[in-house]
Amino acid sequence: MVNQSAIPSTIDEPPYLRGLNPPQREAVLTTDGPVLMLAGAGTGKTAALTARLAHLLYTRKAWPSEILAVTFTNRAAREMRERVGRLVGDAVEGMPWLGTFHAIGAKMLRRHAELVGLQSNFTILDTDDQLRLLKQLVVAADLDEKRFPPKQLGGLIDEWKNKGLTPRDIDAGESERYANGRGGELYVQYQARLRAVNACDFGDLLLHMLVILKTHRDVLEQYQQRFRYIMVDEYQDTNSVQYLWLRLLAQERRNIACVGDDDQSIYSWRGAQVENILRFEKDFPGATVIRLEQNYRSTPHILGAAGGVIAHNSGRLGKQLWTELDAGEKVRVLGVWDGPEEARRVGDEIEAARRNGTTLDDIAILVRASHQTREFEDRFISIGMPYRIVGGFRFYERAEIRDALAYLRVINQPADDLAFERIVNVPKRGLGDKALARIHQLARAEALPLTTASARILDTDELTAQARRSLGRLIGDIARWRDMAQTLPHPELARQLLDESGYTAMYQAEKSVEAAGRLENLTELVRAMEEYESLGAFLEHVSLVMDNEGGRNDPQVTIMTIHAAKGLEFDTVFLAGWEEGLFPSQRSLDEGGTKSLEEERRLAYVAITRARRRAFILHAANRRIYGQWTSSIPSRFVGELPPEHIDTETSMSGGESLWCANWSERADPFADVARGTGRGPGWQRAAGQMGGSSFTTAPKRIVESRASAVSLGNKGRGDLSVGQRVFHQKFGYGAIAEIEGNKLEIDFENAGRKRVMDTFVTLS
């Protein structure tokens, strides 16, 4: 603990100490030696961090140029500079080493560029220039761009640099991750090309400096002597190269203060390693760990719910948030029938809140995946609810959605030249600006749509042989898809079109988080089409949606992903889609196992703690996937919410809940079949890890039916037979046409043939 006698009295204490609680004051005044400020959500870590910086300047423990203060964003650096300036005046202007990792890395590298073969006036490539260079290397290596996308190589090189790996550190195993073992070779060529044009990318700004600090002792000692104090914000988000860079600089004086929250480490997909903050005391023996646990944002019930969930993680340092605020409302857990009802229920709650005086700017909907926003957008437009998408585009404005819609518009309306222009070379077909200009020329001369002009130009020598072949395939495909549209359901047409055009394969080849999100959005687009009777009706709906922007300056509901919401807060927060496979994300669990599960749980903690006064958690009993209604089970995180902090209710537009009566019945191997996901044992293991907590009560006959099916595993019920008349809560009455284990093919009187689980039907 800090020496209490060293703390100034409240009579003559400097202004930066006023209003700080005891742990915050301790974090400010414990200046010497390593310090870890473990700051929970909403505990005033920015106030403590800036006060500490002000204290170092105010007491003249260091000159402004002797303090290294590192942030993750320019916004955070600017805010810190402004806050410290208000506390200590002009002294902050003399702080050249306050900024982001990359800004400080660039400043250092320009001083020592020659040590890594660069000149001090090197260029920092943007993403487009970097991709252009990578394409040149891939083409020179005689590789197929479609099979081995340059963007994938760029992502891999960026990952290596975030780990602090130079080309000589890449072993055969790592090299195999691209182009059948040529990844390392191309990394070497890429770095050589960068040096040849006196350039570097963002990853080099820290990697080059790490190499310099490791190999030039005089440079390392120069910076170790210069920086008397080092301060780092958001330490839980550091990657390997940032961690190694900081550790080298802090080795000599050891006056490093890191601020972070292990429970809010949610960026592993960007290279962040929660292990960095977890091993702080091992890296810096004798470190002082100060826990900021008094929360100034949320009510006790919200903190209790979030704390109950995160307590299930084993990889954490541990803290207990508390607040002096009134208890407030319990977190409301709402069970709904399906996705559309989820959007309806949220809309109803928001309208009620607005009638009670809540401004829309204080309300947010947080989702795990960007494709979830579509359901809410459609609902809000239909009821005239103003909304904004933060951290991304509106669903129908996203590039991949616009591309897919362009394909569909060409099928629906052959004269849609704007749509044809968009897709003629997407994915790449070797049809560049020159080819399109010649098609335009013919179209104008003969007053033809571009598709017709394209068909005509194939019989001329206007295009190269390669361009004619590519254009011919596209025009042939469009004609074939247009014929298929006469008989094939429009959602199935869209799926087939995206596959056959190579559009889906284009993103599958990228193997990146962004590409995976785009594929999810395309799946959601197809799902949205199922709600409309024809392709024309769907495209008309989209046109109306795109035209409905509303007043951008009026109060609006915020819709965003949980990742984008970190650092923000709202009076009322709706957390949608808390179901297994959606949240926690099945893809994350498949790729990372227990480690990813713990990060998903941290994401749940971040989501709940964005709420100041009211939090709603929603989960649906059914989701529609590829035209089939499949049952969903609530997220395991719902089962981890402490009962004393939540109110649970079920709102079923189609009648009573069909869910089983208790959590343990949901957590059986049968559940992976019930979801209809086709997932294997990995999903079963995930389901098997759920705890026990009571939920909504279903009708007695449904519970008994479910229980008997669970006891039979995948064998199915013995009381059903082909031809038998049954009732399903969603689809109504029908007759069993086929039985396969616990799966039924049923001809419903009003809904047609559906494939359902036997546990969701009763004898009529």
Image: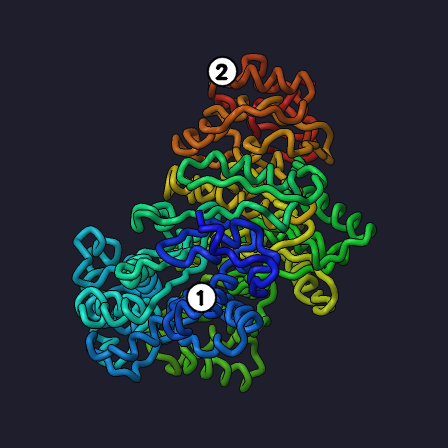
Do residues under tags 2 and 1 come within 8 Å of each other at their CB atoms?
Answer: no
Picture residue at 70% right of the left edge, 56% below the top: 362
Of the image marks 2 and 1, the number of the one nearer the N terminus:
1
Crowd class of label 2 (few under 14; some 14 to 19; many from 20; radius 10 Å): some
Picture residue at 48% right of the left edge, 61% below the top: 52
Label 1, secondary structure: give it. helix
Identify which residue, 7 or 353, lies in the foreground: 7
- The vertical placement of 682 against 29, above or below, is above
Q: Amino acid at mark 2?
A: Leu
The colour scheme of the drawn protein is: rainbow
Q: Quadrant of the C terminus?
A: top right
* Residue 490 placement, left or right of 142: right
Query: Is residue 193 at least partly visible in the picture?
Result: yes
- The vertical placement of 611 against 78, above or below, is above
User: Which percent across, then down, holds residue 414?
Assistant: 57, 68
Identify which residue, 226 or 505, lies in the foreground: 226
Q: Amino acid at mark 1?
A: Leu
Crowd class of label 1 (few under 14; some 14 to 19; many from 20; radius 10 Å): some
Which residue position is annotated with label 1? 56
User: Which percent across, then down, holds residue 645?
Assistant: 64, 34
User: Which percent across, then down, holds residue 418?
Assistant: 56, 73
User: Which percent across, then down, holds residue 183?
Assistant: 23, 60
Q: Quadrant of residue 552?
A: bottom right
Label 2, secondary structure: give it. loop
* Residue 217 placement, left or right of 88: left
Q: How far apart in space, not on screen, are marks 2 and 1 (Cα)?
A: 69 Å
Q: Quadrant of residue 308?
A: top right
Name of the residue lying farthest toward the right: 355
Identify which residue, 67 or 619, lies in the foreground: 67
Q: Which mark is residue 712?
A: 2
